[in-house]
Amino acid sequence: MSEISKEPTEEKSLNFIEQIIEEDLRNGKHGGRVLTRFPPEPNGYLHIGHAKSICLNFGVAQKYGGGTNLRFDDTNPVTEDTEYVDSIKNDVQWLGFQWVNEFYASDYFDSLYEYALLLIRKGLAYVDESTSEQMAAQKGTPTEPGTNSPYRDRTPEENEALFVRMKNGEFAEGTRTLRAKIDMAAPNMIMRDPVIYRIKFAHHHRTGDKWCIYPMYDFAHGQSDSIEKITHSICTLEFIPHRDLYDWCIEKLEIFPSKQYEFARLNLTYTVMSKRKLLQLVNEQHVTGWDDPRMPTISGLRRRGYTPESIREFCDRIGVARRDNLIDVSLLEFCIREHLNKVAERRMVVLDPLKVIITNFPEGQVEICHSENNPEDPNSGIREIPFGREIYVERDDFMEVAPKKYFRLAPGQMVRLKSAYIIKCDDFVKDEAGNVTELHCSYIENSKSGSDTSGINVKGTLHWVSVNEALPIEIREYDRLFTVEDLSTAEGDFKDHINPNSLQVITGYAEPALKEAAIGAKFQFMRKGYFCLDTDSTADHLVFNRTVGLKDTWGKVAAK
């Protein structure tokens, strides 16, 4: 019988975007060139859904020898801030990508204004004085055509004069708009004379007070793509109805024909992906900020201890689909668990301490034990761990009356202390309330790890910390921010479903090697999970965030 190969027998199948690009390359479209763009609005921090878009846009461009522009859609000065611009650039680079050009929609305000004038001169745009309520009524319904605005039939000359006056600041906000003149009976309601410019007297973070009229996203998007000669404009599914307007503008302006393609956005269980809702959480102080480790923002995930490799792997695993679906957050946690298992150094930290006195170990004596930093990485080296007469173990590693197959500490039972000795539980002490406060154990002298000649085999191995050298640390144990799996179908306000137990703060006791940890350093606290040193840490007060547990406990709960 031949040996079964463990190597993949075929390449991973192409997603539909890659299929489109390969077909275009075969046909010589765009001269064999691939240029994508990532166009975030600088009105909030990026989240895990944006990470999927980043990985797709930058990933396909890299795969086919092309490039990606980072273009900020800064067409609404009321909500935009340079803080968001800086955070977005930081997040993209942290994920491992670099743009070929950094652009802003505001770079094109002069060109967009000229495009608007061109539509006016062609009789394809008009200045409307209708209120927003009147325009909504004019739109009609999906089953009934709309009605024409009373201002629809102004001459191009009248419209141009009014539009110039709009630009010059002669009209108040809300009193004039520029609308594309398309078809008030169009089946796609977006094509029923959409607004393409509005008046806003707001200071812009880049253009200052030069403009008081600003293009709508639907008008700026396609033209910006065209100006940059983007070959594949990749958007999420909600932009499918907008594609008709995207194509109409490009056709009527007779400019470079960028083309829009849509894929399914990322929806994640126990998570909100709306920047508006995330901003509510920040402003109403349900979280400590955009980078709160419970937030699905890239900065929050980074602070919690996620790695760019794990997020890229997650985005690769979920793939690129044409239909919306709900992805289990456990898959994201699986990806970070898999990566940290390979790269995180191991440390012993006791979270719920129970003191153990090793009665036959000399008082005042300290012995140095040695332990590997990461058994998955032979080059990670070893570290020194002090061992003494008094140690801490986890409280749940002792049972006064132990059931069968309980291989931890119990009266008369033996365990191995990780990288140290085998000990036997001889006795225990209780307080007046009946709580166990102390264990009395003895150690087997010739059982030290690495030089054990005792011949004793034990089935349990415990982590521990020497009491005298124990380093107190703050542990922030994070859980799901929401209690409902699918918030899109949950009743009431989304904030009604915030998990009141999403953060628990406790004190842990760590081996002294953690004193040398750098901000952002990631560790496996043995038998407990993966943790990251938080930015709130000081030299005298270390704070660790729990990134993820060692096992998928939520998956088990859901299965029940």
Image: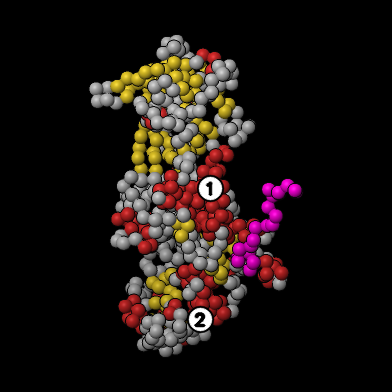
Q: Residues within 10 Å of mark 1 (few under 14, many from 20)?
A: many
**x then y, percent, for residue 463:** 47, 28
**C-alpha distance separating marks 2 and 1:** 50 Å
| Residue 321 badge | none
Name the image quarter holding residue 546.
top left
**Residue range corresponding to the magenta coloring:** 1-20
Of label 2 and label 1, which has the lower sequence position?
2
Residue labelled with disc 2: 119
User: Quick check: 105 above or below 417?
Assistant: below
Q: Residue at x 56, y 59 (%)?
A: 319
Q: Secondary structure at mark 1?
A: helix
Q: Residues within 10 Å of mark 2 (few under 14, many from 20)?
A: many
Residue 214, visible in the rendered structure: yes
Q: Residue at x 35, y 48 (%)?
A: 287
Q: Residue at x 67, y 66 (%)?
A: 22
Name the image quarter holding residue 535.
top left
Q: Residue at x 45, y 25 (%)?
A: 464
**x then y, percent, for residue 63:** 66, 58
Residue labelled with disc 1: 335
Q: Amino acid at mark 2?
A: Leu
Does residue 354 appear left or right of residue 527 in this picture? left
Observer-nearest of 225 and 51: 51
**x then y, percent, for residue 306:** 50, 45
Q: Amino acid at mark 1?
A: Cys
Observer-nearest of 70 and 437: 437
Observer-nearest of 192 and 102: 192
Q: Secondary structure at mark 2?
A: helix
Q: Identify the residue at the far right of this view.
A: 2
